Image (tube, rainbow, N blue to C red):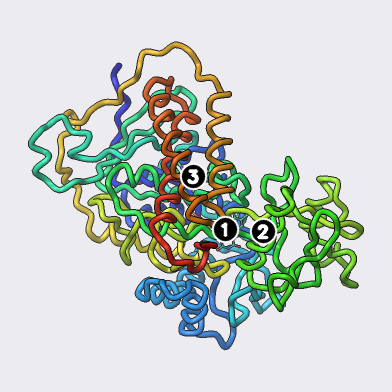
């Protein structure tokens, strides 16, 4: 079968804040850009669901103060160079790109003054926000801006399957004598189910995080970490995957899809209770329900495990005099939609996988260890977050490194491709007529997600991790075989990537015997 072949100057995989920032900067420098997303809606991404806001610098604030807070949360293993870049360049990019260029209407405390919110771990009020739907507006403004450029092609419903690399995909045996290089990607058109080859001298991974390899997550279902899996497969260095940050309280409801209940609800006096109504936080911390995020998450998990329960309760109604509807309008409305009136009753909550601090190791300009491949945003590891992420720094990291990566590519652009397209292997389709049985895929996902939740999640032990490794290794073996024999579709690709990501996290956790930040070992 003749393959659909495309060529571009820069291929960007993912259209959240990181991919969109890269695309905007590249478009402005005149490069020809293809940006793909596996979703049918351009805006569907973790970025779209970000609630709290984006870090800037408030009045009386200083980059050095922000740096201190990032180091404190990161538990001492942050990359000082990267933290320096974020702290010094972040506010400038927020001002020039988000406020001046995209005209994002951040919430103001008065017509002249921006409203800087406070969040846990920050020593100053410095978070810009658009009420509690910051990510949605940012994402929509970026997409509207990108649509104005004729040198940008936006492709929805296109799933990146495998990075194209030489020598790996080359038919020419002498290519092995050259350094490995990424030259684009095999991309599945979700609708036609055909694989295209998109060639580019520069490929940027902006595929976001992997919370959805866990049973409970605040991330949308698609956040399964495709980028980590593809980069690993292509031979790029991946680091710090054991540092998965969990949020203590997401709504427990079969249809709520990990809706976050902000930590400010506990700040207003709410208390955590077991299913039979007992408060428990005093057993774990003198600060009780106001203990730091990690401690609260672990306490909830312990209580759930000890009582064989899937959730605990968060009770605000019994402990506050504030006007709940006015203080938490979005949370109130969302809970009510699921039949829970938080002004009268407790909210069932469960911790949720929230953010991956590790990823594809990159330098100050987003370059990975593989020539031609950049990574930006949550899929990358710049070292900014160390072992744990300071709240609201991830949108900023995507903006800063997305823009920097595009600047670097534009200023070093070399159109000479060191390969011949006809020497690259076309995609191989097994001759299969039958549609894939979705029950097989669903069951494998249930296995991956519950294994990760129970054995490689909030509280880890050597025995649990060993069990995870054994179960996941076996599953990988079966999924690889299934993948080779299955008819190509996005769910089959997702499963193959998902098992790889689960293994990356598990092996990293096994390899690190030190509890630090978001990696917690009980033994
Ligand atoms: C509920 C929630 C609240 C949050 N609140 C905040 C906050 O207030 N402040 C903050 O700083 N951070 C917050 N975060 C974290 C933050 O939203 C993310 O870290 C950030 O948006 C990641 O941006 P990104 O561009 O790297 O990835 P994403 O925004 O996740 O975008 C990934 C893109 O890659 C695409 N993609 C993935 N795989 C493929 C593939 N195989 N082929 C093609 N396309 C692919 C997706 O379709 C998507 O377009 C929150 C996260 C969640 C889930």
Residue 332: x and y in percent read 82, 57
- Asked if residue 167 lies left or right of residue 120, the reply is left
Looking at the image, is mark 3 or mark 1 earlier in the sequence? 1
Tell me which numbered mark, 3 or 2, is placed earlier along the sequence: 2
- Picture disc at residue 74: none
Give the percent coordinates (x, y) of residue 354: 57, 56
Residue 347 percent coordinates (x, y): 81, 55
- Residue ID at (66%, 74%): 117
State the image coordinates of residue 234 (x, y, percent, origin top left).
29, 43
- The answer for how far apart the CA atoms under marks 2 and 1 are is 8 Å
The correct choice, above or below, for 315 with respect to 74 in the image is above
Residue bearing the label numbered 2? 302
Please give the name of the residue rendered at 40% of the width and 23% of the height, measured from the top-left corner. 194
Residue at 52% across / 73% down in the picture? 73
Q: What residue is disc 3 on?
A: 467
Residue furthest bottom as drawn? 60
Instruction: Work out whether residue 276 or residue 523 is closer to the camera in this orientation and state it.
Output: 523
Apparent side of residue 309 relative to residue 406 in the rendered image (left or right): right
Q: Is residue 306 left or right of residue 475?
A: right
Q: CA distance from mark 3 to mark 1?
A: 14 Å
Label 1 CA crowd tier, 10 Å (few <14, some 14–19, many 20+): many
182 or 494, nearer to the observer? 494
**Tag 1 or tag 2, which sits nearer the N-term?**
2
> Which label belongs to residue 459?
1
Question: In this rendering, which labeled residue sits more in front, label 3 or label 1?
Answer: 3
In the image shown, does 436 or 204 lie closer to the viewer? 436
């Amino acid at each position: 079968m003749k393959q659909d072949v495309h060529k571009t100057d820069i291929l960007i995989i993912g259209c959240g804040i990181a991919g969109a920032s890269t695309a905007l900067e590249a478009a402005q420098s005149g490069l020809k850009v293809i940006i793909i997303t596996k979703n049918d809606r351009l805006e569907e991404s973790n970025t779209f669901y970000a609630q709290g806001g984006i870090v800037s610098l408030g009045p009386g604030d200083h980059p050095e103060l922000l740096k201190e807070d990032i180091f404190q949360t990161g538990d001492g293993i942050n990359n000082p160079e990267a933290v320096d870049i974020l702290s010094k360049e972040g506010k400038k990019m927020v001002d020039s790109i988000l406020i001046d260029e995209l005209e994002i209407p951040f919430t103001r405390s008065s017509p002249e003054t921006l409203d800087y919110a406070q969040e846990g771990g920050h020593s100053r009020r410095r978070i810009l926000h658009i009420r509690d739907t910051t990510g949605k507006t940012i994402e929509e403004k970026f997409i509207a801006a990108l649509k104005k450029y004729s040198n940008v092609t936006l492709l929805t419903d296109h799933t990146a399957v495998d990075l194209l690399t030489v020598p790996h995909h080359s038919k020419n045996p002498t290519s092995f004598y050259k350094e490995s290089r990424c030259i684009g990607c095999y991309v599945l058109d979700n609708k036609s189910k055909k694989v295209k080859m998109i060639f580019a001298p520069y490929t940027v991974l902006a595929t976001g995080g992997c919370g959805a390899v866990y049973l409970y997550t605040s991330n949308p279902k698609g956040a399964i970490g495709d980028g980590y899996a593809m980069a690993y497969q292509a031979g790029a260095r991946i680091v710090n995957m054991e540092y998965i940050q969990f949020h203590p309280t997401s709504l427990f409801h079969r249809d709520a899809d990990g809706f976050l209940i902000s930590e400010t609800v506990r700040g207003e006096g709410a208390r955590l209770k077991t299913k039979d109504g007992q408060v428990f936080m005093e057993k774990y911390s003198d600060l009780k329900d106001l203990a730091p995020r990690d401690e609260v998450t672990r306490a909830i998990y312990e209580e759930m495990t000890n009582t064989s329960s899937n959730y605990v309760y968060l009770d605000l109604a019994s402990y506050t005099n504030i006007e709940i509807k006015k203080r938490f309008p979005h949370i109130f409305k969302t809970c009510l939609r699921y039949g829970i009136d938080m002004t009268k009753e407790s909210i069932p909550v469960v911790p949720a996988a929230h953010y991956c601090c590790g990823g594809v190791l990159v330098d100050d300009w987003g370059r990975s260890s593989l020539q031609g491949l950049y990574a930006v945003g949550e899929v990358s590891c710049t070292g900014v977050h160390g072992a744990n992420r300071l709240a609201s720094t991830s949108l900023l990291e995507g903006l800063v490194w997305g823009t920097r990566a595009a600047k670097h590519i534009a200023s070093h652009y070399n159109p000479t491709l060191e390969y011949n397209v006809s020497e690259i292997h076309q995609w191989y389709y097994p001759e299969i007529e039958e549609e894939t049985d979705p029950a097989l895929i669903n069951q494998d996902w249930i296995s991956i997600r519950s294994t990760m939740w129970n054995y490689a999640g909030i509280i880890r032990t050597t025995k649990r991790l060993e069990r995870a490794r054994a179960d996941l290794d076996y599953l990988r073996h079966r999924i690889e075989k299934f993948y080779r024999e299955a008819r190509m579709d996005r769910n089959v690709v997702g499963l193959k990537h998902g098992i790889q990501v689960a293994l990356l996290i598990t092996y990293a956790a096994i390899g690190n015997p030190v509890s630090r930040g978001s990696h917690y070992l009980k033994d």
